[in-house]
């Protein structure tokens, strides 16, 4: 695991982002990759790479100063995106990525790391719990077109 190098890793990182967010157009676009790294002092992107150099996972985190559901402090680190290629799951790759994000979160002065997952994404819930997260609340969002 290492910090992403946007000049070297853009294509591989972009492919992993598309795998995590397949319904979101442009998540692999250069402007989106740059945005994930900004501001430099408040963003962390880590890439997990196999011994043969294949990108197999990533984690994106951000320092948030707005209220984050389930937290009791501000600012907090927030795990914005976390993905491990299916063939590599269950081998500690995800845990290593979270450990790296935890170190970054502590280094920027935060006492809490938060994350979220869709209600139906039970494998993600299990992965979060396996990495030491605790569930704090469940939310259903509503909207009304006007």
Image (cartoon, rainbow, N blue to C red):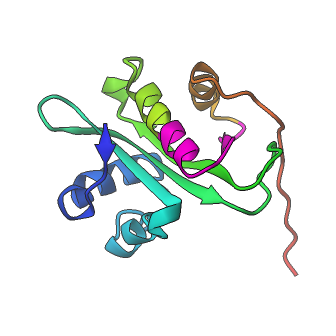
Identify the magenta region: 101-119
Residue drawn at the location 48% of the way across and 31% of the way down = 99
x and y, in percent, of residue 73 in the image: 79, 49
Asked if residue 103 lies left or right of residue 84, the reply is: right
Magenta span has 106? Answer: yes
Q: Quadrant of the C terminus?
A: bottom right
Relative to residue 117, is residue 25 depicted above or below?
Answer: below
Residue drawn at the location 18% of the way across and 58% of the way down = 8
Q: Quadrant of the N terminus?
A: top left
Magenta span has 141? Answer: no
Relative to residue 22, is residue 39 depicted above or below?
Answer: below
Residue drawn at the location 42% of the way across and 70% of the way down = 32
- Residue closer to the observer: 111 or 20: 111
- Residue closer to the observer: 22 or 68: 68
Relative to residue 71, is residue 32 depicted above or below?
Answer: below
x and y, in percent, of residue 25 in the image: 45, 67
Q: Is residue 142 visible?
A: yes
- Residue closer to the observer: 23 or 70: 70
């Amino acid at each position: 695991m290492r910090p992403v190098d946007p000049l070297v890793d853009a294509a591989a990182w972009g492919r992993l982002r598309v795998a995590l967010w397949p319904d979101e157009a442009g998540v692999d676009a250069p402007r989106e990759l740059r945005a994930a790294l900004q501001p430099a002092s408040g963003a962390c992107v880590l890439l997990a790479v196999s011994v043969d150099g294949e990108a197999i996972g990533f984690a994106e985190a951000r320092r948030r100063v707005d209220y984050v559901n389930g937290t009791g402090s501000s600012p907090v680190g927030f795990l914005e995106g976390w993905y491990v290629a299916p063939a590599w799951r269950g081998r500690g790759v995800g845990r290593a990525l979270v450990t790296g994000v935890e170190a970054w979160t502590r280094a920027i002065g935060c006492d809490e790391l938060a994350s979220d997952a869709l209600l139906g994404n039970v494998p993600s819930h299990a992965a979060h719990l396996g990495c030491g997260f605790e569930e704090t609340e469940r939310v259903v969002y509503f909207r009304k077109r006007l």
